[in-house]
Image (cartoon, rainbow, N blue to C red):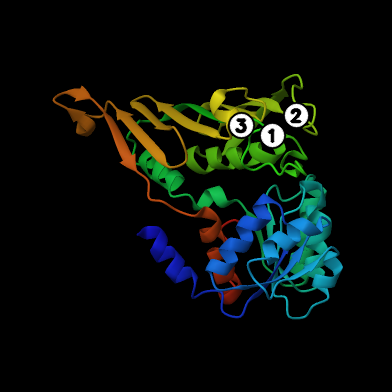
Amino acid sequence: MILLWIIRVGNTMGGNTNIAIIGCGWTGLRHAIAYRLCGANVSWAVDVDKRRATAIARSQPDTHVVQDARVVLEDPAVDAVSICLPSALHAEMAILAAQAGKHILCEEPIATTLEDADAMVAAADENSVTLMIGANARFNPLYPNMTELLQEGVIGEPALVRLNRETHLLGSQHTDPESESLFDEGVMMSRGVQDIDIMQMVVGEINSIHASRAPQRIHRAYTDDTSIATLGFAGGAVGTLMESCASGRLETVDGKELHTFRVNGELGSLYSPDPRSLQLFSFRDDYLVNGRPMRKDIHVPEADTFLLEVMHLLKCIQTGQEPTTSGR
């Protein structure tokens, strides 16, 4: 029911907004679907692989297919672009889009160097356009729920934070057999940045981080296929992050992504076995049952995070407000 309400509300937001999808892989397709649910017009699909762009255009006859993004940026009717390219190409495309006066939703990470990120922000400022980063995990209701529980002190002060994400490149639902650009910068850059953002959003500011990569096992991956990081939080907690697209397990080889998140505190723990579930275990008096601690399963409402992300972008374009996930 909640998802249906989101779709109904979203469908009134797009108006006559014209969108170009630049990069038409798995993520670009999700953006296109979300825009259409919001009533926006996906007027252009851009990809060097014409077959992928055509796949997005197939469900909307008015979508034009092109391989050169400059054609799109020269179209005065285009209001905004979604940049779903390999990370190393984000800065160049975003700067060109800003200079053309287009609002921007750019997939994370914003760029691969701080200098490129600064240049993107400067271009957006100079041309008065929205620069939003596609951190769609921030629109998952699970993580605000965890943040609120931590702030209420249900497990006391966080002490240990652990987040693991495991997939297998050969079985991943996100992997296009023709192109594995999801992993163009390695798992820590392509996936780890999202999970570090989640950890920081839920637990608080991170003030130290150290990462190491495992020996390469999947040689088709461009850089690291498995890496770990240790993190120090400003509040005193420590954390570990494990990212792998070479996790040889039955579930991952069959295409499942395993994504778990646990926060342990002095009074118990919060555990998410997947991004749609949350379990609470607390020694706090008001959570005891007959004097004993019990596990409490917390319902997390269904949400299309790409749809919520696109709705937020369209609202920011219409109102001029700064996005929650601003690149600035």
Badge number at residue 167: 3
Q: Residue drawn 74% across and 21% down?
A: 217
The three-letter code of the residue at mark 2 reads: Asp
From the top left corner, tell me how far across and down residue 211 is, in percent: 69, 26
In this picture, is 110 found above or below 268? Answer: below
Residue 86 at least partly seen: yes
Of all residues shown, which one is farthest toward the top? Answer: 215
The residue identified by callout 1 is 188
How far separated are the C-alphas under marks 1 and 3? 13 Å
Residue contact between numbered discs 2 and 1, judged by CB atoms under 8 Å: yes
Check disc 3 and report its element: helix, strand or loop: loop
Looking at the rendered structure, which numbered label has been put on residue 140? none
Residue 326: tell me if it is visible. Answer: no
SS state under label 2 = loop
Residue topped by disc 2:
224
Q: Position of residue 25 (x, y in %)?
A: 71, 52
- Give me the C-alpha separation between circle 2 and circle 1: 7 Å
Q: Quadrant of residue 283?
A: top left
Task: Say if 236 sits above or below 70 in the image.
Answer: above
Q: Amino acid at mark 1?
A: Met
Which image quarter holds the C terminus?
bottom right
Kindly identify the residue that appears in the image at 73 percent across and 38 percent down.
183
